[in-house]
Every structure is written in structure tokens, then in C-alpha cells.
């Protein structure tokens, strides 16, 4: 009897099979819907060209009564999409949608890391800009700019990054301006963590 009690205690604490919530995740493939006979996807950005990726996936999961997003994939250049924060359509050829979103159980916050390859932003005219290596014009370069990008994407900080030199145009996110000179450097990859 004592052995059975110990076994039940171990099962209850999750020490044998892991936490109970480890299996309680829900995946939505091609999240979106139909409006006026038109199939649409959920845009990867919460607002036009801003707060992309994790913030939108988390909001989608929350709207379905679930915890934060634990994993998601993108389908690039697949209009039309619905930009949920702005409540408007994106019908440009460059509109990106989620291919899938996996949500954790309600009330659970999972530690997450995401790698943004060739991170970019778009202006209101749908022009794409790589993220400049510097947070402000020619100062606060590298880690400060990578950290700020991660924060805009809903993460705490950058754990690593790589750069591409002399690749304009770029967007200087701290000054909210573009850099079009031949010497503008951009991030090739930023890895963000919560």
C-alpha cells in the first residue's frame, strides 16, 4: 500500500511522465476563415507591419480560450490576410499568414525562443526594410538594436544575432527612419527569447 501511495504521489507531481500540461496543446493548421466567399489567413502582424509573430499568435490563442502560443509557422506571400489589430485586410502580394499556430493550455506560459531570419519591417506603403544593425543612427549597434527588435516582437531579449554588411535599405527602429546609403548594415538573423 505504501508503494502505491508513493507511485500516485509521483504521478500527481508529474515526476514520472512530466507535467500534465505537456500533452495539452492544440494546433490550428492554416488559421483563418471565409468572408464573402473569400478564404483568408490570419496575418503574421498584429498591426500593419508591426508586432509580428509571437504577439499575434498569443492573441489568437487567447481568443480561443487557450494559453500562449508555443510554436507557429508562416506561409509567405499568401494574400488575403486579416490584420487583427487594425481590423483591415492585406491584399498585397507580399502579405504573409500563419501556416499553423500551436497553443498551450489556458493559464500556462511556456518559455519560448524564436529565430527571425532576415528580419524586416514594412512601411505604410508596403515597402520592405531590413532591420538596421544600429538602434539609433550609427550608435547603439548590435545587442541594443537586436534586443529592441525582440521587444517589439513580444520577446524579452536577443540571445544571438548575425549581420549582413552594406545591404540597404534598412530601418533604424530607434529613430523610426530608413537608411538607404550603401554602407547600411542589417541583421541577417536575430534569435529572441521570452
Image (cartoon, grey):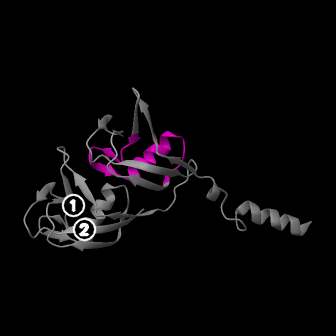
**Residue 5 percent coordinates (x, y):** 85, 64
Q: Is label 1 in a helix, a strand or a loop? A: strand
Q: Looking at this rendering, what residue extends furthest in the top direction?
A: 36
Of residue 71 and residue 143, the one placed in the foreground of this image is 71
Front position in the image: 57 or 100: 100
Q: Position of residue 142 (x, y in %)?
A: 23, 72
If you read the primary sequence from the N terminus, does the residue marked by circle 2 or circle 1 appear first? 1
Tell me the residue that label 1 is attached to.
Answer: 130
Q: Is residue 100 above or below residue 145?
A: above
Residue 52 within the segment the image draws in magenta: yes
Q: Mark 2 and 1 residues: CB-CB less than 8 Å, in contact?
A: yes
Q: Position of residue 180 (x, y in %)?
A: 9, 61
- Helix, strand or loop status at disc 2: strand
Quadrant of the frame with the C terminus: bottom left
The residue at the point 19 percent across, 48 percent down is 123
Q: Is 14 placed left or right of 49 in the picture?
A: right
In percent of width and height, residue 179 lies at 11, 61
- In the image, is 73 to the left or to the right of 76? right
Span colored in magenta: 41-69
Choose top left, top right, bottom left or bottom right for residue 191: bottom left
What is the quadrant of the N terminus in the image?
Answer: bottom right
Residue closest to the eye, 164 or 171: 164
Query: Which residue does the numbered mark 2 point to in the structure image?
Result: 187
Amino acid at each position: 500500500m505504501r508503494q502505491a501511495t508513493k507511485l500516485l504521489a509521483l504521478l500527481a507531481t508529474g515526476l514520472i511522465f512530466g507535467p500534465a500540461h505537456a500533452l495539452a496543446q492544440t494546433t490550428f493548421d492554416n488559421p483563418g476563415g471565409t468572408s464573402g466567399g473569400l478564404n483568408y489567413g490570419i496575418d503574421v502582424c498584429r498591426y500593419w507591419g508591426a508586432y509580428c509573430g509571437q504577439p499575434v499568435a498569443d492573441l489568437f490563442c487567447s481568443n480561443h480560450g487557450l494559453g500562449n502560443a508555443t510554436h507557429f509557422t508562416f506561409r509567405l506571400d499568401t494574400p488575403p490576410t486579416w490584420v487583427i489589430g487594425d481590423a483591415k485586410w492585406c491584399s498585397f502580394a507580399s502579405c504573409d499568414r500563419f501556416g499553423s499556430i500551436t497553443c498551450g493550455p489556458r493559464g500556462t506560459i511556456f518559455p519560448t525562443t524564436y529565430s527571425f531570419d532576415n528580419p524586416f519591417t514594412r512601411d505604410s506603403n508596403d515597402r520592405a526594410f531590413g532591420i538596421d544593425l544600429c538602434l539609433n543612427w550609427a550608435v547603439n549597434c548590435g545587442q541594443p538594436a537586436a534586443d529592441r527588435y525582440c521587444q517589439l516582437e513580444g520577446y524579452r531579449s536577443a540571445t544571438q544575432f548575425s549581420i549582413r554588411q552594406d545591404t540597404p535599405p534598412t530601418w533604424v527602429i530607434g529613430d523610426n527612419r530608413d537608411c538607404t546609403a550603401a554602407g547600411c548594415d542589417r541583421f541577417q538573423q536575430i534569435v529572441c527569447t521570452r
